[in-house]
Image (cartoon, rainbow, N blue to C red):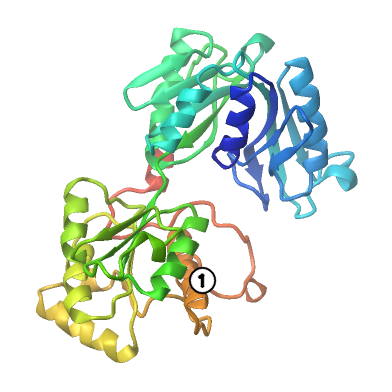
Amino acid sequence: MRDVLAELMAIWRAGDTAGLGTVVRTFRSAPRPPGASMVVAPDGSVTGSVSGGCVEGAVYELATEVAETGAPRLERYGVSDDDAFAVGLTCGGVIDVFVEPVSRATFPELGAVADDVGEHRAVAVATVIAHPDAAWVGRRLVIRPGQLAGSLGSARADAAVADDARGLLAVGRSEVLKYGPDGQRLGEGMEVFVSSYAPRPRMLVFGAIDFAAALAQQGSLLGYRVTVCDARALFATPVRFPTADRVVVDWPHRYLAAEAEAGAVDESTVICVLTHDPKFDVPVLEVALRLPRVGYVGAMGSRRTHDDRINRLRAAGLTDAELDRLRSPIGLDLGARTPEETAVSIAADIIAKRWGGGGRPLAETAGRIHHDTQAKDPQVKGDLNDYLTRY
């Protein structure tokens, strides 16, 4: 819902009803992940996508019907459908889409949820998508770290779902949970889709150069909150970095250390050092590579610059294990030359690091295209797989 929230809120504030279709479950090579949404406005206009085009027409018709009748529906689309040629997924995948009416009456908490998302506060929305009692379908529970709003239908169900939803929110994952009709953990009959809105991950770019401007744009496209930091006030200006969320004038190592101390750097944070100047990049890399939890650390520079940088970092006391975390020279080998091409190369490396991709052309690989879980950083204790194993 995050990708269509602005349009959905405009309809909600106007007092109208929208038809909202959300991917809640995927199988095989589904084109969009759980949480991807499509909004049908009262005037018939469409925002967002649930399948990249394969079944949009069918979902559009259903969303229009649901907005009029007020009765939510859970539908499955895929190659097993009788009408697969007309509305099936050409990629061979299968998706479950929950379509519901959204208005002030059906979702009174939406305004507060939108505020949380806009202010980067963690919030999850749990929605009943299947239940033996049709009256339960569409009920919601809004979960925050220390607060609940709404109800699924009983205190028992609310307590069970809230507990599990907070676990999913902690790892930023959206998925369907199954319970008995009253929230029994070992039962069946009730399915609840938990949509997690964890704060957007951060990208910290050090070095206010033209490559940083291109990378800030790529980072924004990937959903990061981008901060550009440089000690030189002449270059670190918002005008030069219009797509960055924040431009900071400070010494890179001092700013990063302060952010880490404040708890603003975690395992989802991406750190890109583009200064290729020892007086800037060595001190900030000393801080970055010693952080216990960080998603990516990369540094720009030639092979000669890289070798000199490694020697300086080793002289500063960094261990081989810490140095192994450094992606340098930064980026994948795409033959990039311009700042924009280099930014794509860096973005590709970040994606590969996050999901465990090999960086090879898909035409040269076999097996599944999409990686299901994030790759585990050996320096980070615990990951998504650990959570899924526990629950």
Is 88 left or right of 359, judged from the image as shown?
A: right
Q: Position of residue 251 (x, y in %)?
A: 18, 65
Observer-nearest of 49 and 17: 17
Q: Is residue 341 above or below residue 380?
A: below
Q: Position of residue 363 (x, y in %)?
A: 67, 74
Q: Position of residue 337 (x, y in %)?
A: 49, 84
Quadrant position of the C terminus in the picture: top left
Q: Position of residue 150 (x, y in %)?
A: 48, 14
User: What element does badge 1 sit on?
Assistant: helix
The residue lying at 64 percent from left, 69 percent from top is 366
The residue lying at 82 percent from left, 32 percent from top is 61
Task: Give amino acid for label 1.
Answer: Val
Q: How many marks?
A: 1
Is 115 left or right of 48, judged from the image as shown?
A: left
The residue identified by callout 1 is 344
Q: Is residue 100 visible?
A: yes
The residue lying at 53 percent from left, 11 percent from top is 182
Observer-nearest of 68 and 370: 68
Quadrant position of the N terminus in the picture: top right
Q: Residue furthest bottom?
A: 304
Observer-nearest of 221 and 324: 221
